[in-house]
């Protein structure tokens, strides 16, 4: 049987989550919200890694991203 994991709460998100995406390794979780920003959290600890600001509206879509391509993630305003 495989390993079991306890759920971890992503820290820092104070709004509803409209979009989620993982990096290719599954180590980072990106969430988009009506706060017009993207939060990046560590999937094991739930700790906040960074906030990405600059969107002009709700962040509603996310695409998985690949660290080896030096692209963090792709999001689109609604």
Image (cartoon, rainbow, N blue to C red):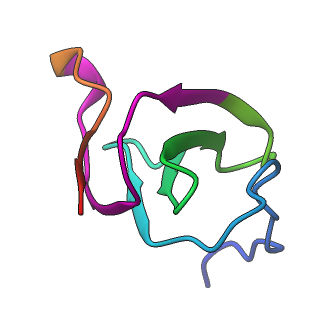
Question: Which percent across, then down, holds residue 15?
Answer: 69, 66
Q: Residue 63: tell me if it is visible.
A: yes
Q: Is residue 43 left or right of 28 when viewed as pictured?
A: right
Q: Residue at x 81, y 45 (%)?
A: 45
Residue situated furthest top in the rendering: 70
Magenta stretch encompasses residue 60: yes
| Quadrant position of residue 69 | top left
Residue 27 shows up from this direction = no
Q: Which x, y percent locates residue 48?
A: 74, 36
Q: Residue at x 80, y 48 (%)?
A: 12
Q: Position of residue 14 (x, y in %)?
A: 78, 60
Across and down, in percent, residue 39 comes to: 58, 42
Q: Is residue 56 magenta?
A: yes
Please name whichever residue, 77 or 11, is drawn nearer the observer in this view of the structure.
Answer: 77
Screen quadrant of the C terminus? bottom left
Q: Residue furthest left?
A: 69
4 is higher (above) or lower (below) than 13: below
Q: How many marks?
A: 0
Please, is residue 49 above or below residue 20 in the view?
Answer: above
- Left or right, 59 with respect to 53, comes to left
Q: Residue furthest front?
A: 56
Whether residue 12 sits left or right of residue 71 in the image: it is right
Residue 33 relative to residue 8: left or right: left
Question: From which residue to which does the magenta span run?
Answer: 50-68
Q: Residue at x 58, y 53 (%)?
A: 35
Q: Is residue 43 above or below residue 48?
A: below
**Viewer-proximal residue, 25 or 12?**
12
Residue in the foreground of this view, choosing between 1 and 5: 5
State the residue in front, 8 or 37. 37
């Amino acid at each position: 049987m495989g390993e079991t994991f306890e759920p971890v709460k992503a820290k820092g998100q104070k709004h509803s989550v409209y979009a989620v995406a993982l990096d290719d390794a599954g180590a980072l979780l990106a969430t988009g919200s009506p706060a017009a920003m993207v939060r990046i959290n560590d999937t094991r600890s739930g700790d906040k890694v960074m906030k990405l600001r600059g969107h002009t509206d709700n962040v509603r879509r996310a695409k998985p991203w690949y660290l080896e391509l030096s692209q963090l993630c792709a999001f689109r305003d609604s």
